[in-house]
Structure formats: structure tokens, C-alpha cells
Amino acid sequence: MSDVAARAGVSHQTVSRVLNGHPHVSATTRTRVLAAIAELGYRRNLSARVLATGRSNVVGVVAQNTTLYGPSSMVQAIGEAALGADLSLTVGHVAGYDATAASRRIVERLVQQGAAGLVFIAPVDAAAESMALVPSGLPIVTVDGLPEWEVANVSVDQYAGGMLATRHLLDQGHKTVWHVAGPEQWHGSRAREQGWRAALAEAGAQAPPMPRAGWSAASGYQCGRMLARIPDCTAIFAANDHVALGVMRAMAEHGKRIPDDISLIGFDDVPEAGYFHPGLTTIRQEFAEVGRQALRLLLEQLATGARSAESALVEPVLIGRDTVAARPA
Amino acid sequence: MSDVAARAGVSHQTVSRVLNGHPHVSATTRTRVLAAIAELGYRRNLSARVLATGRSNVVGVVAQNTTLYGPSSMVQAIGEAALGADLSLTVGHVAGYDATAASRRIVERLVQQGAAGLVFIAPVDAAAESMALVPSGLPIVTVDGLPEWEVANVSVDQYAGGMLATRHLLDQGHKTVWHVAGPEQWHGSRAREQGWRAALAEAGAQAPPMPRAGWSAASGYQCGRMLARIPDCTAIFAANDHVALGVMRAMAEHGKRIPDDISLIGFDDVPEAGYFHPGLTTIRQEFAEVGRQALRLLLEQLATGARSAESALVEPVLIGRDTVAARPA
DNA sequence: CGCTCCCGTGCTGCGGGGCAC
DNA sequence: AGTGCCCCGCAGCACGGGAGC
């Protein structure tokens, strides 16, 4: 910066003023300074800037498993929203929240970097430990977190989604609905399961045994191979779309037709879900909306300077396609 | 830091030495300092540290469209490799390299942050413009970049993949192979197309007209609806697995059976590809290996302090499943 | 003489390197 | 060998001062 100042024949302070768009700088000196900056290819040092101001305009995002469609979509959405608010995003990818050392380092790093606030994509219990590392003054927003954490949180209403799916199947005349659940550690899995149970209870239907899958098609396939052998099973609510795909595959191998013999409903509405064979009826999660809301809650905290525990729920939407039909006679 | 020093009854340099694992510090003072740090919950300020040392140990990654499986897997892999090398990652997500202002800002930000090196996930032409913003001293590695950029680059050998797929289909007796290409701006699409053409030429087969899809199942479906109406078309090489899914859907709707009437091969080997109906034969890209190689090339440059133009190619692998069969009589 | 506008002089934040003790 | 001292890196803030009306 002093180089620029020397070249423009001014003090480094004037350069600083120009860079910050300070009003009281004459047009001539401003152009002179800008010229010098251009000639020297000068760039401000962000570290020094953060050090001097104490403000970073950086939002840290802690996410795990960003190869999954849901998390990656949300990170993307948060990024776009941040851009609009003139904030930068640095994303720390943790391999898994359980890998304590690694995720600890990532959070530490974001905090030390002077992030103005953090967004945790925190769909599993273990995320709470990482959050504990954050100094209490720093705003936090969780996505898919738990209410008992008492921090601002955004999530799709998974419970409502579970009910929506289950009711839709019951409405078609199915006596009950089987549920292939997601991993137990995921809050979303548990909420969907509860929604499923609630809808069954409200209809006076028995809850059948519940197999548990991962989020993968492979695990859905394994569960499907069991369900295909159970004659009573005519309606299935799968943990997500890829699990549903695995189930579809298992059914096909067992000669069970969808939707004629088995009705099936997924969760997420991944872009390719409509092109499964047949097109998958599913519960859509508006990940982009979740990202936007998360940033909104963070901005509010940045404005007030205090943590809040406000939470936002995004409504899931039923997307009807071709995997649900009336119960076979 | 001075607080810690005061509490431990030493100077702030001694604290610094302890934090940096400097050898010449007595065990007693070390424990005293560590105790003071723990009591005060002290954390070093990264900005100040970077400012003082000039080294950041941060690798910047510039990626677009991280909701796609390929890019997100590579970012993940780079992250894991970086963790092993004691480097941190900050990922800048650009919405698209064409959105000049936005991607420009992201690169600027990473540079100003003092990133030690940058990895560009640069599968499209427009990425070159972003790269031009990087000061010439900074090491760069591209993933899926172009050789003419003359920077270190890693990619899966897409050309070989295109040949692999095409030859595999020709080996089954198909007269020729149709190709549903990916977006024109993507280097990978072009290389796969060239591999396809080369394999056809080598077999003396005519190259049929080439429809172009995006990367989505929806666009694959549109192309598939055309191909399904062409009696000569018995073998299709799709731009990627999701495009292949769309093609499968279109074929099913037209009463064309896979693989009996149409043989199909995809690209990527997304985790669910084996659970399509039928299981998709495809060309696997080892994204994790690409990520590791990318970091290796970056580390080499960091060690030598100079940019290199070394490039690495990762071999694609044919994964045989159930969508390829001999040409119908 | 007061004001506004413009610009420069310290000094600060936080941590690290070289040297002296 | 173990510690402390001074100064440095880069940008910003609170001054303070000179020019002009």
C-alpha cells in the first residue's frame, strides 16, 4: 500500500480512503491513486484488513458429506444468498462430525479466520460437539439442527413430510404403510419416522416393523428384498429418493409391479426422480429456500449482534408422479 | 496473547514459542503457558498470524455447480487429501464461471486471503478468465482443465473413456454407436465425443448425427425420445449416467427394451447407477483419485515454489452391468 | 474567524523473526 | 539452553493541520 502511496505521491492513508470509498477525497487524487493501483497490480491484504477492522464479512459454513444432493444444494443456496448480501462464504467440509479431530480443526479454523458467523449443516447429533467449540459471541445458524440446542435453526418440516407421504398412501386405500427409515443418527430420519407414525396412528393403522437403510440405493435395495417377500406390504414410504430407487429395483426383481402391486413414495425430489422407472412420487424439499432462510436468520443476528434461537420451517411439498396407486384388491 | 503472557508471567514471545512448538522452551514455563491458555480460552488470531508469517496453509478451491456428483466428489476428495497434508481448504462456490462479477470476486477473495495455492475445478472454457486473475507467483492446479492453459492439470482421461465405451458397444456387434453428448462448453464432453469418433473411425463405422444434452436426466429424456424413433439406433453412449437414465425412460415409453433392443452405456458411475432398471453399464471416473492427484501436484509446486505444467491423467474404468448386449438380429 | 474539504501523522491490532542477554 | 527486547507486516482509525471560502 505504501508503494501505491509513493507512486501516487500521497500518503497510505489516502490510498486507504480511496479503496474504502471515503467521501472526502478529491477527484484528481482519486484517479491518481486508482491509476497507481492499476499500474502496480496492487491488491489489499485481507488478513491485515480483518486485523485492523475486526470485521471479516465472511460466513463460515460447516458441512459434512457434501456429495449428497441435499447438503450440496443447501451449501449452494447459502452461497448465492450470501453473494447477494455482499458476504463471502468459506465452506469447511468435514468428513463426518464424528471424526472429532478433523471437524474440530475445521471449526477452529473458521473461528480463527474471523468469520462473522457460522452456518452448521447439522443433520446429525454429533454436530453439537463441533458447535460447542464456537465462542459464545459468534452468531450461529443451524440447518437441520435440533430445537433443544437453542440456536437459530432452519429446516424442512420433516415431520410434516412424513405425515404427508403416509397420508397420501393411506388415502389410496392402503391398510397401512411400511417405512424404510434413514440412518438413526440423522434428525431428519427420526422426524420423518415420527410423522409416519403419527399419520398411521391418526388413521388407526398399525405401524409395521421398520427396516433401516442408509441414504444409498444399495441399502434401499437390501431392505426392498425383504419387503418384496411380505405379501401384506402394499405401500412403502422410503427414506429418500435413492433408497426408493433401490426398493424399486428389488421389487422388479421379485416380479412386484409398481404401482400396481406396491405403491412407493420417496423424499427429496432429486432432479432425476421423475425419470426413474416409473417416475417417482416423492416429497420435495426446497433446499434453496432453506439456504435463503438460513442466511436471513444469520443476517438478523449480525444486525442485532446477539444470538437468537429463532427457527424457521420450510414446508415440504408432495410431488405426485407414477409410483402411487390404489391398494390392489 | 499479552493477556496470556501476563497470566503466565512471561513475555508474549514465549507464548508464541510455545504455540509454535519451538524447542528451546523449558518444560515448566511451557506447562505454565499452556495452563494460562486453557484458563483464558485463548485462541490465536489467524489473520494476524498470516500477516506476520506470510504463509497461510490454506488451499483455495474454486468450483462451480457443486450440486453435481462429479464436482462435489472431487471437492470432497481434495479436502480429505488436504487434511492429511495439514492444509486447510476454503472452497469458493461460483454459480457459473460466466457470471463474471461473482466469480471474479471469489477468486479475488481467495487470493487476498493469502491462499498458498489454488485448485480450479475448471471443466468449462470460461474458467480461464477467472484463472487470469491469479497473480503469477501463486501455484495453480486445474482439474478438468485444458492443456493449452499450460498449468498443472489433473483429469480423468475422458478421451480414453469415450473410446472404451464405444469399443465396448462395437465389440458386441453393433454397426455403429450413437452418442448423446454433454454440453459443448465442457471439455469433458468434447473429449468424450472425440474418443467416440476415434473408436468409430478405427472400426470403420460411420458416425451418426449427435444430439446434445445437458447433464440432466430431463435433457437425456428429450434426446432419447428422438433416438427411440430411429430403427437403426441399437447402441447409445450417453454423456453421463443421468442422461442415460433419461434415455432409458424414453426407450421404455416407446416400448424399446434395454438391452434387448438398445444397448446403453453411461459415464461417471454415480452410486445409484447399479440400481437403475436395468443396472447401468458405465464408465467409472475415480473422482477421489483425481482429488488426490490434484493435491499432489499442488504440494509439489508449493515445495519448489514455482508453477509447473505437469499433468496427470486418471484412467477410466468400464463397469459392466446390464444395459449392454449383442446387436439384435 | 469560523467552517468545510482534503490530506498526512502517529498509533493500534496480533503475532513472529532476529538478535541480545 | 532458555527468555526478553525491539521491530516488522498491512491496513484502518482518531486525531491534527493546512488550504480555501
Image (spheres, coloured by chain):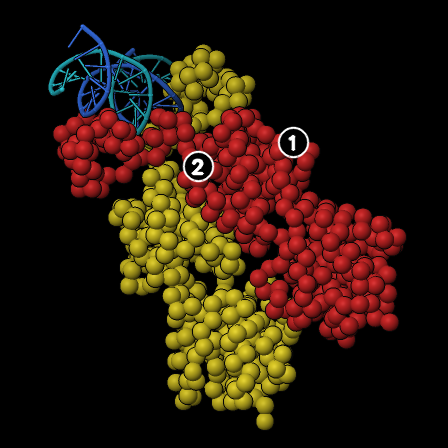
Chain colours: A red, B yellow, C blue, D cyan
Q: Position of residue B99 (x, y in %)?
A: 37, 53
Side of B30 where A327 appears, left or right: right
- Res. B285 in view: yes
Residue B140: x percent and y percent? 33, 51
Residue located at (55% from left, 41% from top)? A294
Coordinates of residue A318 in the picture (x, y in percent): 68, 57
Q: Quadrant of the C terminus of chain A?
A: bottom right
Identity of the residue drawn at 38% across and 48% down: B102
Mark 1 lies on residue: A150
Q: Earlier in the sequence, mark 2 or mark 1?
A: 2
Label 1: chain? A
Relative to A22, say whether A247 is above or below: below
Mark seen at residue A185: none
- The residue wearing badge 2 is A58
Rendered-image quadrant of the N terminus of chain A:
top left
Graded by Cα atoms within 10 Å as few (under 14), some (14 to 19) or many (20 or more), the crowding at tag 2 reads some
Three-letter code for the amino acid on which mark 2 is drawn:
Val
Between residue A187 and residue B36, name the one nearer to us: A187
Q: Residue at x 70, y 55 (%)?
A: A239
Left or right: B155, with A39 as reference point: right
Element on which disc 2 rests: strand
* Observer able to see residue A218: no
Q: Nearer the viewer, residue A18 or B245?
A: A18
